[in-house]
Amino acid sequence: MQQTANMLYYEKNEVPFLRLRSFEEQKWLNHAFATRLGGVSTGIYASMNLGFGRGDKDKYVLENYRRFCSAAGFSIKDLVATAQTHKTNILRVGVENRGAGILTLKPWHDIDGLITNEADVSLCVYGADCVPLLFADPIHHAIGVAHAGWRGTVAGIAAVTVTAMEREFGTCAADLLVGIGPSIGPCCFEVDEPVVKEFLAVPAFADGTCMKNKGNGKWNIDLWDANTKILQQAGVKKIEKGMLCTRCRPDLLWSHRATGGKRGGMCGILSITEALK
Ligand SMILES: [Zn+2]
């Protein structure tokens, strides 16, 4: 194990994966983020592509899931995945949904966040620049994942996920642990004025501290900081940022911007290994 940015880097059976220290300390959980390495896909998808429907062969994507799950300690039959579309809909899932989106077709659309309090239901979140968020409530043994691209960040999906966990599991935001996985960093996320205006219209971002004007009609936005602000406003106190930029590490990670969209997809997985009795 070694340190990569603020993340822990592991390799098993030649499959690398990344973890967050604060989540690793929660012994009732398992979690891991994939990289672009250690899979069987070829060409623009080489080699660990975990995105179905990107043009890669399904049998390769499935084999990649098998390898990633086996390395990181998950069972492929427990995975639950959805088609993420930059919305803020959160869905509660359970053991009856295991396999959905991986071994069977994705049964839902427009779902960008999943929550559960059942053991062995492994929640998947995708990204290749967009911010993958992990949520863990150690009091109620409940978890969530959410996909926050810039649109989801502006729409406050991080806070919507907290609210869903409060409603479904009695979670208290102050107890929550939230992790920010590999995604495009403030170093590389450059946007034009229309996007800046959308950020400035959100009260949490109105002071402009999560963005930097480059003076050439471009701004850099810090999605890690922006999501942190949204979470803090929702009452979350414990937030761990992986600080690992996808665009800066094309050797290790998929980046939509670095590849011009010709790429595979990464997945973060979070599951409860021990439900609260
Ligand atoms: Zn970067």
Image (tube, rainbow, N blue to C red):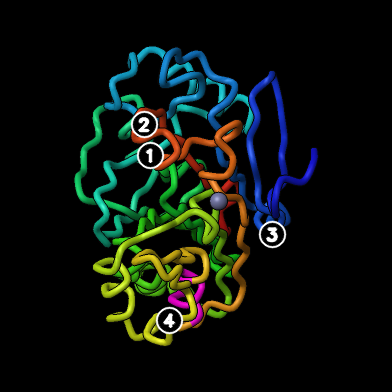
- Sequence-first tag of 2 and 3: 3
Label 4: which residue?
208
Marks 3 and 1, how far apart at CA: 23 Å
Q: Residues within 10 Å of mark 2 (few under 14, many from 20)?
A: many
Q: Residues within 10 Å of mark 3 (few under 14, many from 20)?
A: some
Residue 56 in the image: above or below residue 233: above
The disc placed on residue 22 is 3
Q: Give the x, y percent position of residue 255.
A: 46, 39
Which amino acid type is shown beneath numbered disc 2? Answer: Gly
Which amino acid type is shown beneath numbered disc 3? Answer: Ser
- Mark 4 vs ligand 1: CB below 8 Å: no
Q: Give the x, y percent position of residue 69.
A: 55, 28
* CB atoms of marks 1 and 4 within 8 Å: no
- Sequence-first tag of 3 and 1: 3
Q: Give the x, y percent position of residue 106.
A: 25, 35
- Sequence-first tag of 4 and 2: 2
Label 2: which residue?
99
- Sequence-first tag of 4 and 3: 3
Residue at x 39%, y 73% (from the top left corner): 159
Membership of 94 in magenta stretch: no
The disc placed on residue 80 is 1
Which amino acid type is shown beneath numbered disc 4? Answer: Gly
Marks 4 and 3, how far apart at CA: 29 Å
Marks 2 and 3, how far apart at CA: 27 Å
Q: Give the x, y percent position of residue 47.
A: 51, 19
Which sits in the foreground, 229 or 276? Answer: 229
Marks 1 and 4, how far apart at CA: 37 Å
Q: Secondary structure at mark 1?
A: strand
